[in-house]
Image (cartoon, rainbow, N blue to C red):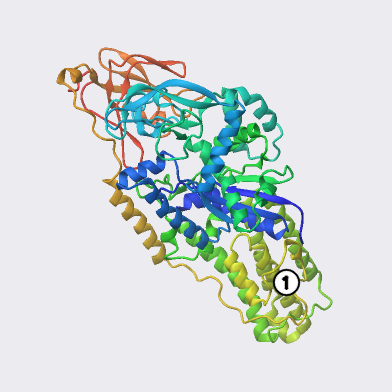
């Protein structure tokens, strides 16, 4: 069935600075593919667009570490990631790249139009500059002390301890991550997006949202409540899309300005490749088109605030109808960390298992509304207990029995019993539930309801006992096989969005065409005497040894990277007298409590011998207050007081970050007040 509905689906452009891991898959790509495959079956005209984000600091940092040019890095990972997506069945219509000529031209045209409309603010300002490297420092190239929580390893764009968004000039004691030098302030010119000025227009649009996830609306409302401020659209870098206006020499478009435009440029390339050069306009400039961005929660602000503002101000483009963002996926109870080797790379997964197994396991554990956890043992359980024992077992029973006792033909349904009729009705009942869940982006629920139909089939087959009725009631036996095969046929179609390879195999065993639509899914798909094939095992069970091997691989990689964790470079030498200015004292924590309205900060009363001090520290996610009472710590006692969340903090408790990213106290057994030297 064909419709006039046009749907444009995008998945977040992955940085081409490393391979894809299962956290990426669960966050932005698997759910988008579920939705796209379903919508295609409804007859909608769908364009599924993605590509490599090949600009920005993440790329230049990867190139710097590898001693290569940025282009070498992006060429390698663009090819690798494109191939792994294809192997996992992520059915992009086009997978582009932001280093392409089309993208450069599209981004520059976009910028120039906004420039000519007077959208940008031009500012001459002072930014941090590394004299040793002779370059201005992008935000991720600056590290220092967070002005909010005092964390000493904050980056210039965000403190990863308390989550505060920052600019490099806000950091205390900033140093260049490239050279370790203390940067200097130097004048430069940039163009800014005046987000605050257009906030009312954005808020009007946000007020029209219907059916958006609470995690998305909550984050956006929080930003709006705080008030939007000017945001840079350009930066001083040599790698990226050159700024196309006078005065832009040596500058590039900020990556979060040009990256979302990559969706548009990739759609242009897709249209050109299809032989219809202007087809992209049907998806970006027809207000009847529905645009959906599938992303992880770290991209919500960019896709729900910044990019929509750019689209509004340009005036020629549709706005997102929904942004079904997912939360984060953890691994074996720990935060995914590529630098620490705590990750499962998809290209390595494919060396041992089939794509559908992970598509199903992740689909059942999606972080749709809160962070979720992937474990290898749960993966094994999902495959063995659900795919093999429920779905595979039911399909094999139905087809094998038909092959053996009904000459591999679908028996006629004759005077069906109430149970037969009720079970057939459940096919369309489950389809309605699955459809409703998919339309509301509840993919975990949709997959569960699909598997429930297989459970219904198993229970029905067991209850009707065809192995008995084939001898004393062949009509009843034939009815059981007919109903069971109809369920198998429906499953072969309903499973298509989730586990396409397995769904195609079921259709092959049922001698069904791969050409079908969502409207075809109903009771009675198979006519009487329809020929089927001999039933084959769909899913082999995963042995404990295979899972142990995966866990061992994960642990070994983490151990290998434990000593190879990226550590900040040593800072320049200081004079002994500079060190002696620090008053380091042994202290004992007397009280500890959470600060109201803060998820990160704890307030301590610390005995430092000569007096008792109030000290605030951003370590709430690592420790519970009650477990800290009596702990002996090291304190910087002569740090200037600072107010954090309304509480004056007088000093700093010294901490160290372990390879897992957790903060640990620098402890001492000395009497409180003892000097540390």
Q: Quadrant of residue 655?
A: top left
Q: Position of residue 476 (x, y in %)?
A: 77, 79
Q: How many marks?
A: 1
Q: Quick one: 349 or 73, which is closer to the camera? A: 73
Q: Position of residue 480 (x, y in %)?
A: 73, 76
Q: Quadrant of residue 466?
A: bottom right
Q: In the image, is residue 560 above or below residue 417?
A: above
The N terminus, quarter of image: bottom right
Q: Quick one: 548 or 187, which is closer to the camera? A: 187
The C terminus, quarter of image: top left
| Residue projecting furthest to the left | 576
Q: Residues within 10 Å of mark 1 (few under 14, many from 20)?
A: many
| Residue projecting furthest to the top | 610
| Residue projecting furthest to the right | 415
- Whether residue 255 appears in this view of the structure is yes
For the point 46% across and 16% down, the residue is 646
Q: Position of residue 575 (x, y in %)?
A: 16, 21
Q: In the image, is residue 193 above or below residue 277?
A: above
Q: In the image, is residue 222 above or below residue 612?
A: below
- Whether residue 366 appears in this view of the structure is no
Q: Quick one: 482 or 6, which is closer to the camera? A: 6
Q: In the image, is residue 80 above or below residue 591?
A: below
In the image: residue 451, left or right of residue 154: right
For the point 68% across and 86% down, the residue is 405
Secondary structure at badge 1 equals: helix
Q: Quadrant of residue 370?
A: top right
For the point 60% across and 50% down, the residue is 267
Q: Quick one: 159 or 47, which is closer to the camera? A: 47
Residue indicated by mark 1: 486
């Amino acid at each position: 069935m064909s419709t006039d509905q046009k749907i444009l689906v995008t998945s977040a452009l992955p940085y081409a600075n490393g391979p894809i891991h299962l956290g990426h898959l669960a966050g932005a790509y698997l759910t988008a593919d579920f939705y796209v495959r379903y919508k295609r079956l409804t007859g909608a005209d769908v364009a599924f667009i993605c590509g490599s984000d090949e600009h920005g600091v993440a790329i230049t940092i990867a190139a710097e570490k590898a001693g290569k040019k940025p282009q070498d890095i992006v060429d390698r990972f663009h090819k690798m990631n494109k191939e792994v997506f294809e192997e996992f069945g992520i059915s992009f219509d086009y997978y582009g790249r932001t280093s392409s000529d089309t993208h450069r031209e599209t981004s520059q045209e976009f910028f120039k139009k906004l420039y000519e409309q007077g959208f940008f603010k031009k500012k001459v300002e002072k930014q941090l500059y590394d004299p040793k490297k002779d370059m201005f420092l992008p935000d991720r190239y600056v590290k220092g002390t967070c002005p909010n929580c005092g964390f000493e390893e904050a980056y210039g764009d965000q403190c990863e301890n308390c989550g505060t968004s920052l600019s490099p000039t806000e950091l205390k004691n900033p140093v260049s991550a490239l050279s370790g030098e203390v940067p200097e302030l130097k004048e430069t010119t940039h163009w800014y997006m005046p987000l605050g000025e257009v906030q009312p227009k954005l808020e009007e649009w946000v007020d029209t949202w219907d059916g958006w996830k609470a995690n998305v609306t909550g984050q956006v409302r929080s930003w709006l409540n705080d008030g939007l401020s000017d945001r840079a659209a350009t930066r001083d870098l040599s790698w990226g899309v050159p700024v196309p206006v006078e005065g832009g020499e040596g500058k590039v478009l900020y990556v979060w300005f040009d990256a979302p435009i990559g969706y548009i440029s990739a759609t242009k390339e897709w249209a050109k490749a299809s032989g219809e050069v202007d087809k992209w306009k049907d998806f970006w400039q027809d207000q009847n088109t529905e645009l959906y961005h599938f992303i992880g929660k770290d991209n919500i602000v960019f896709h729900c605030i910044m990019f929509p503002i750019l689209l509004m101000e340009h005036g020629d483009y549709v706005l997102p109808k929904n942004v079904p963002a997912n939360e984060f996926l953890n691994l074996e109870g720990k935060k995914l960390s590529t630098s620490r080797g705590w990750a499962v790379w998809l290209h390595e997964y494919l060396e041992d298992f089939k794509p559908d197994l992970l598509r199903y396991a992740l689909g059942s554990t999606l972080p749709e509304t809160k962070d979720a956890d992937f474990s290898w043992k749960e993966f094994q359980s999902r495959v063995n207990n659900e795919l093999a024992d429920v779905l595979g077992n039911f399909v094999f029973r139905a087809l094998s029995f038909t092959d053996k006792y009904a000459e591999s033909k679908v028996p006629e349904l004759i005077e069906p019993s109430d149970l037969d009729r009720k079970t057939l009705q459940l096919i369309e009942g489950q389809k309605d539930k699955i459809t409703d869940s998919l339309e509301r982006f509840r993919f975990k629920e949709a997959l569960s309801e699909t598997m429930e139909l297989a459970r219904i089939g198993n229970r029905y087959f067991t209850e009707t006992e065809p192995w008995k009725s084939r001898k004393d009631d062949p009509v009843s036996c034939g009815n059981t096989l007919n109903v069971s095969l109809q369920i198998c046929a429906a499953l072969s179609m309903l499973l298509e969005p989730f586990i396409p390879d397995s769904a195609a195999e079921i259709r092959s065993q049922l001698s069904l065409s791969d050409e079908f639509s969502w409207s075809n899914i109903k009771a009675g798909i198979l006519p009487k005497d329809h020929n089927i094939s001999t039933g084959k095992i769909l899913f082999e069970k995963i042995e404990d040894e295979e899972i142990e091997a995966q866990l061992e691989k994960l642990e070994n990689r983490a151990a290998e990277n434990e000593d190879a964790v990226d550590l900040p470079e040593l800072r320049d030498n200081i004079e002994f007298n500079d060190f002696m200015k620090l008053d380091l004292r042994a202290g004992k924590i007397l009280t500890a409590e959470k600060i109201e309205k803060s998820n990160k900060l704890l307030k301590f009363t610390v005995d430092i011998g000569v007096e008792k001090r109030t000290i605030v520290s951003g370590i709430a996610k690592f420790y519970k207050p009650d477990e800290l009472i009596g702990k002996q710590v090291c304190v910087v006692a002569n740090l200037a007081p600072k107010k954090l969340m309304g509480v004056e903090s007088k000093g700093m408790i010294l901490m160290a970050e372990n390879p897992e990213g957790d903060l640990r106290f620098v402890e001492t057994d000395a009497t409180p007040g003892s000097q540390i030297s």
